[in-house]
Image (spheres, rainbow, N blue to C red):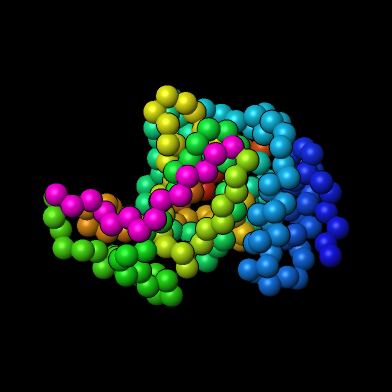
């Protein structure tokens, strides 16, 4: 049994995640335990880390232990969405804090996880056919999802065209780059992650951490 504090505040949550990250537990069991732990977090104090953009979603770093985990608040304006992307060698626990989120998993195309191919084996190009989406899941405030590449590459969207949404993402280990995929061809591009704010401090455009590109 792991002794972690009840996550009454975001600081409590971080303390508990530090304990989980050091615990020697099988990955699948650890993921399930962290999902349950996130469900206990009910506070709105995450808002002190929130920075918004009217035209794209933002990535706001709350805590990071390099090589271990990153805790990131993502703020989604109305109708915004990420690119189709992967999570290279990492798990992600995503909690919906506010609004309604659509999570789309794409598994009906071949994707070689081990060799990290630069292109998916996409269906034959057809302008009248959208990307094949194998599953759509919706999450509302208080719900928590677990994702990794064994489930498929994916895209996250704000499901509302009139309301904002916010999600909290726990990546373990950290992700500093990923592949994004073109919907028409499946061709991939490697991009570096960026943060719009770090621990509550908004970043100047020229000082955005870990490069100038992100999965938005």
Query: Residue drawn 39% across and 55% down?
Result: 135
- In the figure, residue 131 lies in which quadrant? bottom left
Residue 149 location, x and y as percent?
Answer: 47, 64
Residue 19 visible in this rendered orientation of the protein: yes
Residue 16 location, x and y as percent?
Answer: 78, 52
- 135 or 94: which is nearer to us? 135
Q: Which residues are magenta?
A: 128-141
Quadrant where the image shows the C terminus: top left
Report if residue 93 lies within the magenta region.
no
Relative to 140, residue 69 above or below:
below
Residue 98 location, x and y as percent?
Answer: 57, 33
Residue 191 location, x and y as percent?
Answer: 41, 52
Query: Residue drawn 31% across and 58% down?
Result: 188
- In the figure, residue 2 lies in which quadrant? bottom right
Residue 196 visible in this rendered orientation of the protein: no
- In the figure, residue 46 lies in which quadrant? top right
Quadrant where the image shows the N terminus: bottom right
Query: Residue drawn 44% across and 43% down?
Result: 102
| Residue 80 shown left or right of residue 187 in the figure | right
Relative to 44, residue 143 above or below:
below
């Amino acid at each position: 049994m792991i002794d972690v504090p009840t996550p009454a505040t975001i600081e409590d949550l971080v303390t508990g995640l530090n304990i989980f990250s050091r615990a020697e537990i099988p990955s699948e069991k650890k993921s399930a335990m962290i999902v349950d732990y996130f469900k206990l977090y009910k506070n709105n104090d995450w808002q002190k880390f929130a920075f918004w953009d009217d035209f794209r979603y933002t990535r706001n770093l709350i805590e990071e232990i390099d090589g271990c985990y990153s805790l990131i608040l993502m703020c989604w304006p109305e109708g915004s969405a990420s690119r189709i992307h992967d999570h290279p060698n990492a798990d992600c626990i995503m909690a919906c804090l506010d609004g309604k989120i659509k999570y789309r998993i794409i598994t009906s195309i071949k994707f070689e996880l081990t060799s990290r191919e630069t292109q998916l084996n996409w269906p034959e190009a057809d302008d009248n056919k959208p990307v094949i989406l194998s599953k759509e899941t919706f999450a509302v405030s208080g719900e928590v999802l677990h994702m990794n590449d064994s489930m498929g590459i994916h895209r996250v969207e704000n499901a509302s065209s009139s309301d904002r949404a916010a999600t909290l993402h726990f990546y373990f280990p950290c992700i500093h780059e990923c592949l994004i995929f073109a919907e028409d061809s499946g061709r991939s591009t490697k991009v570096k992650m960026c943060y719009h704010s770090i621990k509550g401090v908004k970043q100047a455009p020229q000082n955005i951490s870990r490069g100038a590109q992100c999965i938005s």
